[in-house]
Amino acid sequence: MAAEVFFAGMKSALGSGMLDKTGQLFDKAGFAEFINERDLVALKIHFGERGNTAFLSPIYARRVIDRVKKAGGRPFLTDAGTLYVGGRSNAVSHITTAVQNGYSFATVNAPVIIADGLTGKDYVEVEINRKHFEKVRIASAAVHADSLIALTHFKGHEMTGFGGALKNIGMGLGCRSGKQQMHADVTPSVDASKCKACGKCVRWCGAAAIKVTGERAEIDLSKCQGCGECIVTCPEQAISINWGDDAVKVQEKIAEYALGAISDKKGKTGFINFIMNITPDCDCWGYSDAAVAPDIGIAASTDPVAVDQASIDLVNETAGRDLFKEIHTNVDWDVQLRHAEAIGLGSRDYKLVRLD
């Protein structure tokens, strides 16, 4: 049976603006039905890196929070720490970044709780018994929450082709050591002809795996965690991924972590993809590139695979081509959807229900 994906386009009028539509999608997708009185409801979100401007605006989170409270739930905004050393690698810096980007209690009417604790070591091992992992390490606050709703800025991504709900809960809710497990097959290399030995990659490397020697940077792969931050940091585009089969592995691992993140919440999860400000890469960058497609709208479903499939279909329909495969030529984004469906995370078969 096809999963229902509810969709609201960008065309607005009095009483049907995008904030109104966010609330309508929450209702139509039936999210209130799985929230019990006094449920602790985790709202998984990417707060954006410092300097980034494309992350989801807190005004949308506030509208969802209001709906959760109306349903009797107790919402909190959450994410887990990063591998790289930017503004979100520990809970203090992460919350500070969230507040600087507008996610304060005053603006969203809910607390920010970093799911894997102060230094990324608070996690629960969840048994999944799939292709790559028998157990996955999921940030504890996400596991202990009663319900989960993922609010996702849908965009391109340099490692997975696109970043949607699967990426948001899979990579996003793995603790720091879990993220290292997912990134373990990523091996970056330096193009000496492009490298200017500026040292920016050194400052952002969380594993102290890079040093500048003479006129180029060098990466010690025995220390590298595979987080990819050096790739997105390099202003000369001198660092790239030696993919091979690794683009397949990292996407499959993310899908398995996504399964672990919601495996104990059957019938208690919802997913909203904001297909707006569609940038080519993730919100972990310290800046935002120009959008690669016009704003499309918002999609919501209780099925994370269906909502991602619908979102990528809407992007490609609008662009008239496979946009993210064109941008990230070495990545087949289809892998994450195929594997997610194969391991029972959801269905790629969906019915799009338009609100307008």
Image: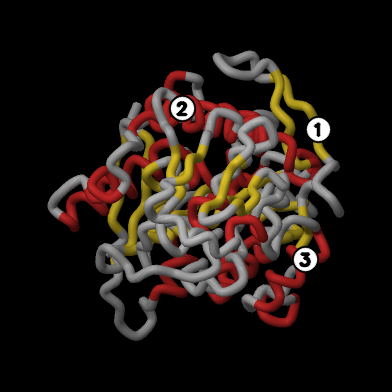
The three-letter amino acid code for the residue at tag 3 is Ser
Q: Which numbered disc flags the more N-terminal residue, 3 or 2?
A: 3
Q: Is residue 312 above or below residue 17?
A: above
> Position of 104 compared to 50: left or right?
right
User: Which is more foreground, mark 1 or mark 3?
Assistant: 3
Quarter of the rendering occupied by the N terminus:
top left
Which residue does the image show at 70% across and 71% down from the upper left? 97
Q: Which residue is mark 1?
A: 124
Locate residue 298, reporting x and y percent. 38, 60
The three-letter amino acid code for the residue at tag 2 is Asp
Residue 121 shows in the view: yes
For the residues labelled 3 and 2, the Cα–Cα distance comes to 31 Å
Whether residues under marks 3 and 2 lie with C-beta atoms below 8 angstroms apart, the answer is: no
Q: Which numbered disc flags the more N-terminal residue, 1 or 2?
A: 1
For the residues labelled 1 and 2, the Cα–Cα distance comes to 26 Å
Locate residue 256, reporting x and y percent. 57, 27
